[in-house]
Amino acid sequence: MSRPTIEYHVRDLSLAPEGIKRIQWAAREMPVVSLIRQRFAKERPLEGIRIAGCLHITTETANLALCLKDGGAQLALCASNPLSTQDDVAAALVAEYGIPVFAIRGEDPEIYYQHIRHALDIVPHITLDDGADLVTTLHKERPHQAREVIGGTEETTTGVIRLRSMAQQGALLYPIIAVNEASTKHLFDNRYGTGQSTIDGITRATNILWAGKTVVVAGYGWCGRGVAMRARGLGAKVIITEVDPVKALEAAMDGFMVMPMAQAAPLGDIFITLTGDINVIDRPHLEKMKDGAILANSGHFNVEINIPALEEMSVRKERIRPHVDEYQLADGRRLYLLGEGRLINLAAAEGHPPSVMDMSFANQALAVEYLARLKERLSPAVYNVPKEIDDQVARLKLASMGIQIDALTEEQRRYLSSWEEGT
């Protein structure tokens, strides 16, 4: 029996007026996407293209969606995390802008995947993903449909890891552009966006003072670098845990303490995971933590902290603030899990500031245009963002900031392309 098609599923359309205001406010901080949107409205490069997007339904995502719609695309959106949807934004996209959205903040896993299926009912030519749940659902449940997709984009580190695994196993059925790998994405969104929004989410959830705290950051990728930098800037003592020797060495030379999680566990006041891996904070670490330790995750999935182990160890669980669960252990210690172990910057705050998402979503928009205009279909694989797109986004962002830079002279170009001249 076929499942009925629905037009949208959001919490409350009456929230739309507030969502419209917030979408417009974010647009003021997204000049690059605005410039691309203006060009798309004139050129209509996405005419006739259907796009399914599994993204955080936020004000910034809304501006990307409006850019793609003005380019001629037909869209359907769903959430890429159960706690990241801004319900007023979802309502505004449906009621004001006519974009089907299937997303409700706090949706359970069953509804979450139902929403993904509803977005896929558009039968997309292009997919947008943030964590690869839409792509994997499409491949598992509708492989015939996946074979007809022109291509897709992936926004985040975790999704890129999953997609590369699919490609290596020969399971990926269409090409994906790894937007996360663009320099104008991970150097800024991951570092400055995650750095600021993670600290913001933890602060809103707890109202803690960072100065003097010992903060343990698991993972020294670009997200971890950003969080460590911001925590230190607020006066915290920062410990880095890593499995990559090069990143660990870099963290040490950046002035951070570096040690295994087992050694850091009894020292930390606040623990923040940003690795994209499972059980980075595991039962042996939980057993060593001091009374009152705070646990937060800023990786894409809620698997980095071993929550089942924490549940088993506890004799009592109580929600003491909107995003804070207190776990009392048998020995009397209390550990505090923030945002149910999900992305704390979106669970307890508003996610990245629009100014930094401006570059990430500019990459998304231009990558979609690139896929739509390809004369020959790429083979199934994970591709980096073309350098010309990366450079274009950087130039547009600099121009929006009123910054000019030098250009190579012809003499300098010739020198750089030659090999004859030496000392």
Image (spheres, rainbow, N blue to C red):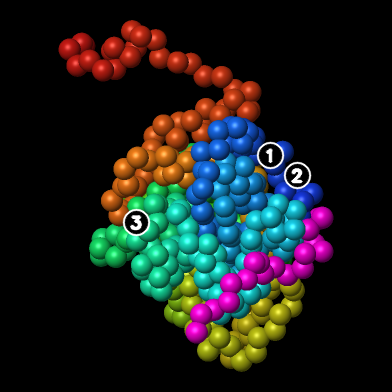
Q: Residue at x 20, y 11 (%)?
A: 421
Q: Tell me, for residue 174, which label it has, or none.
A: 3
Q: Is residue 219 above or below residue 70?
A: below
Residue position for label 1: 29
- State the separation of the CA atoms marked 2 and 1: 7 Å
Q: Secondary structure at mark 1?
A: loop
Count of residue discs: 3
Name the side, left or right, on which 377 lies relative to 308.
left
Instruction: State which mark lies toward you, 3 or 1.
Output: 3
Give the magenta-colored segment's residue range: 1-18
Amino acid type assigned to the residue bearing label 2 in the image: Trp
Amino acid type assigned to the residue bearing label 3 in the image: Tyr
As drawn, the residue found furthest toward the left would be: 420
- State the separation of the CA atoms marked 3 and 1: 34 Å
Amino acid type assigned to the residue bearing label 1 in the image: Glu
Q: Residues within 10 Å of mark 3 (few under 14, many from 20)?
A: many
User: Which mark sits nearer the N-terminus, 2 or 3?
Assistant: 2
Q: Tell me, for residue 307, which label it has, or none.
A: none
Q: Residue at x 59, y 64 (%)?
A: 79
Residue position for label 2: 25
Q: Residue at x 53, y 74 (%)?
A: 113
Q: Is residue 317 above or below residue 197?
A: below
Asked whether residue 3 is drawn in magenta, I would say: yes
**Marks 2 and 1 in Cβ contact (< 8 Å):** yes
User: Which mark sits nearer the N-terminus, 3 or 1?
Assistant: 1
How far across and how far down the image is residue 8, in percent? 66, 67
Q: Quadrant of residue 241?
A: bottom left
**Does residue 97 appear anywhere in the picture?**
yes
Q: Nearer the viewer, residue 212 or 88?
A: 88
- State the separation of the CA atoms marked 2 and 3: 36 Å
How far across and how far down the image is residue 264, in percent? 48, 66
Name the side, left or right, on which 237 lies relative to 171.
right
